[in-house]
Amino acid sequence: MAKSNQGAAGLALVGLLLAASVAGAWNYRRNLEAEQAANPRPYRGYSDAELEQLSAAYRADVAQWQERWIASRAQGGGVRERAHLDERIEEFERTQQVGARQRALGEELSQRQAELARLEAEQQKRAAREDELALHLRRLFSF
């Protein structure tokens, strides 16, 4: 009888450990998916060196676009006084074209700045990486 009770207790312990392992794996996976959904990271697959090169390239690109945008603003789109209707119409068309170019440059600059901000956010996340064991334990045990 004693052997039978030990076997049943051992089997119950194995079952309990198996259930805890399955529950832990399910919870880990759930927390990992929630973490990835809440924090999209399009540059996750890049190495640190590749990320730094890409970031430096975007910084240089943003600087060039800023210079172009500032130069377009300096060229002026100000309205000049004109006496005749034809001259006023030409001036209006010119200022419309200048404004459209400035808006296009500004939009392109904004898009590049946003991409640079995403790159820098990825670099900051990597720099502030928590201890790997703590990360796995948090995923495993948090509900």
Image (spheres, rainbow, N blue to C red):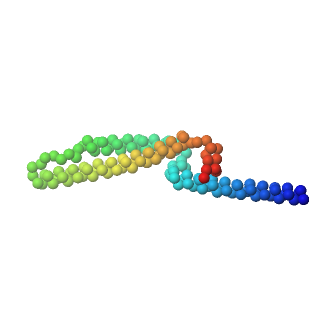
- The spot of residue 131 in percent (x, y) is 61, 41
Q: Residue at x 60, y 52 (%)?
A: 143
Q: Residue at x 50, y 42 (%)?
A: 124
Q: Nearer the viewer, residue 11 or 53?
A: 11
Does the rendering let one see residue 30?
yes
Image quadrant where one finds the N terminus = bottom right
- The spot of residue 91 in percent (x, y) is 17, 51
- The spot of residue 61 in percent (x, y) is 40, 44
Instruction: Look at the picture and state if 141 lies above or below 8.
Output: above
Residue 77 horizontal side relative to residue 49, left or right:
left
Q: Residue at x 30, y 42 (%)?
A: 70
Instruction: Look at the picture and state if 27 lies above or below 52.
Output: below
Residue at the far right: name it.
1
- The spot of residue 103 in percent (x, y) is 30, 50
Residue 40 horizontal side relative to residue 18, left or right:
left
Q: Nearer the viewer, residue 125 or 81?
A: 125
Q: Residue at x 26, y 50 (%)?
A: 99
